[in-house]
Amino acid sequence: MSEENLDMRKTIASYLGIAFRAIGYWKWGVALCLLVTVGGTVYAATRKKIYTSSTRIRVVSANVSASGMMEDEQIGQQLKGRLNQFVSSRRFLQQIIDDYQLYAEEKARKGMTDNEVLDHMRGKLYTGVYQGDEFGFHFMDYNPDTAQAVCKSLATNFMEREKGAD
């Protein structure tokens, strides 16, 4: 054999070695992708579903200032302040927690105090003011019926409180 053929064989052998190593890495890459896909699918199929219930209410204001009707921005600011005060009110939230027996399992299992339960509920409760004269409550829970009932109760309690304040 000539020296040229020997060099060519060595070159071909080194290219084949590189190709086989690349195939080995590729197999590990495919295996990793499959593992992540299967793990994600199992997680998505077995985790608890969280349901969000929302209510949106439009305010028709009878408040008239010296310059005429209040601006939507002013109404929105006042409404936002009253919503924040309502959501931070321990009395109303504790009443809802008691009425619907919210977080009873977590409280018993983790030994949570009433303040911790209130903070936990506040983390699942969102309020919003939309277009100045609309507001809403959003509540998340693992049970869709409970989420809906709590959201409805929040809206009803807030509106009753506002009627009483007039």
Image: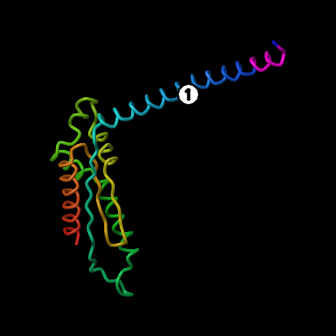
**Magenta span: chief secondary structure:** helix
Image: 97 above or below 42: below
- Numbered disc 1: secondary structure: helix
Image: 10 above or below 103: above
Please identify the quarter of the rendering in which residue 83 is found: bottom left
Given residues 56 and 48, the one toward you in this image is 48
Which residue sits at x=20%, y=53%? Answer: 148
Please identify the quarter of the rendering in which residue 85 is found: bottom left
Looking at the rendering, in which quadrant would you find the N terminus? top right
Which residue sits at x=21%, y=52%? Answer: 150
The residue wearing badge 1 is 26
Given residues 40 and 118, the one toward you in this image is 40
Which residue sits at x=71%, y=21%? Answer: 12
Looking at the rendering, in which quadrant would you find the C terminus? bottom left
Tell me if 103 is positioned left or right of 1 in this view: left
Q: From the top left corner, tell me how far across and down residue 131 is, in percent.
A: 37, 71
Report the span colored magenta.
2-10
Whether residue 66 appears in magenta in the rendering, the answer is no
Q: From the top left corner, tell me how far across and down residue 109 is, in percent.
A: 25, 29
At label 1, the amino acid type is Trp
Given residues 95 and 124, the one toward you in this image is 124
| Residue closest to the far top | 1
